[in-house]
Structures are given as C-alpha cells and as structure tokens.
Image (cartoon, rainbow, N blue to C red):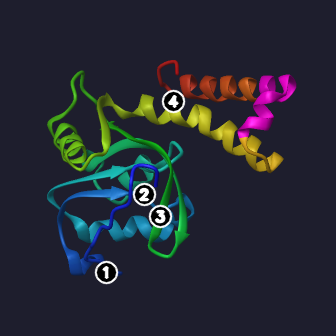
Amino acid sequence: GPLGDFRVNVQASDNPADIGPVDAVVFTVKTYDNAKAIPLIQPLVGPRTSVLTLQNGVDSAEEIARVVDKKRVIGGCTYIATAIESPGVIRQTGTHRRVVLGEYFDPKRQVSGRVQALSDAMLAADIQAEPVADAKHAVWEKFTYLAPFAAFTGAARLPIGPLWAEDESRQVFLDAVMEVAAVAKAHGGKSV
C-alpha cells in the first residue's frame, strides 16, 4: 500500500480449540459469515479475554453477546480502504487506518482500562487507535454514513464521486444520511 509493504507471519488454525484462551479476540469477519464465525469465539475466551468487534453495522456486539458474556464485548469501528489482491495479500488503497474502540455495554464516563490497554497495543503496532468511553456513538456515527453510501454506490454501480457531483443525487444521499441519523437517535444514541 501507499504506506509501504509488510508481512505478518501468524499461526493459523481452522480449529480455535487448538489455540485456546487469548487476551483479546478481534472479530472482523463479514457479517454474512456471523452464524458460522461467532460460535468459534468461545474456545478463545478465558477468564480475562476481551472480544472487540469491528464489523460494519450496528448489531455485531449484540450478536456476539448472545454467545459470549456481554461483559467481555468491546465495540468499535474501523476506517481503512483495502482490497484483496490475491489469497493472503491485502492491498491498502488509502493511507488512513483508524480504529475507534470502547465499551459497548454499560459504558462509564472514562475510557476503561481494558479499552486503553488494547488501544495502547494497537498504537504500538502503528495502528491509529482512538479509545472512547462509549462505542455505541462511534458505531452509529459510521453506520449513519455507511448505510446510505453502500446503498447509493451499489444501486448506481458507481463510486460516490459522480453521485456527489449531481445536485439531485447529493441531496437524496444527504436525506438518507439524516434518516439513518434519526434511527440512531430513536435507538437511544446521541445525535450523530
């Protein structure tokens, strides 16, 4: 990618029981694989394991909490542009690589110790991590833009640029953003 290339050597297994309990699980699979992937988290959970979900959408933390105690779940979102170039090769197409993370259930006024520790580990790995006290706001904030963005670009089969350049499509897009923001507010979130 534009920031340079690097290789990560990992120990991989298709059986999480082979790995056993870990300090943190970072859950990033596509949501259409949740039914198969979420149960695979259980063998990785020990007495002090945190599970960070960085999936797009607003249901991931609740889905994981049905399988793993909700006290273990940390919510978040990520901002990175990538593409699978070939099996095992991910091409970063932009320079941003930001992760926002925080408590999802029962957040406090301050960033929790476990969120700060996970953020510190990410920062040490040159990941732009932003710890927050309450992840719900960040998750809904991203969804407020992403849902209309995905719908508009997918339906038009165009990147956002040509859609944004036209007054009418730009206004319809902004109206859709406001509609999702109203859903976020009705869901109990702060204004996004």
Q: Is residue 83 above or below residue 105?
A: below
Which of the pair 141/121 is nearer the observer? 121
Which of the pair 181/187 is nearer the observer? 181
Cα gap from disc 3 to disc 4, whole angstroms: 26 Å
Give the class, few, some or many, for how many residues have Cα within 10 Å of label 3's Cα (few <14, many ≥20). Answer: few
Tell me, yes or no, whether the two marked residues, 3 and 4, touch with CB atoms within 8 Å: no
Point 69% across, 37% down: residue: 148
Q: Mark 3 points at which residue?
A: 90
Q: Where is residue 61 drawn, in percent x and y?
A: 41, 47
Tell me, yes or no, whether the two marked residues, 1 and 3, touch with CB atoms within 8 Å: no
Q: In this view, does 70 lie above or below 181?
A: below
Q: Where is residue 125 drawn, in percent x and y?
A: 24, 50
Point 41% across, 64% down: residue: 38
Disc nearest the viewer among 3 and 2? 3
Q: Is residue 176 above or below residue 38?
A: above
- Magenta stretch: give its range: 160-172
> Which type of secondary structure does the marked residue at label 1 adopt?
loop
| Residue 28 circle label | 2
Give the class, few, some or many, for how many residues have Cα within 10 Å of label 2's Cα (few <14, many ≥20). Answer: some
Q: Mark 4 points at which residue?
A: 141
Q: Magenta stretch: residue 75 in it?
A: no
Q: Which amino acid does label 1 sit on?
A: Ser
Q: What residue type is labelled 2?
A: Thr
Total numbered circles? 4
- Of the residues under marks 3 and 2, which one precedes in the sequence? 2
- Of the residues under marks 3 and 4, which one precedes in the sequence? 3
**Horizontal side of residue 138 vs 160, given as left or right:** left
Point 14% across, 36% down: residue: 113
Point 27% across, 72% down: residue: 9
Q: Name the residue under label 1.
A: 13
**Horizontal side of residue 134 vs 152, given as left or right:** left
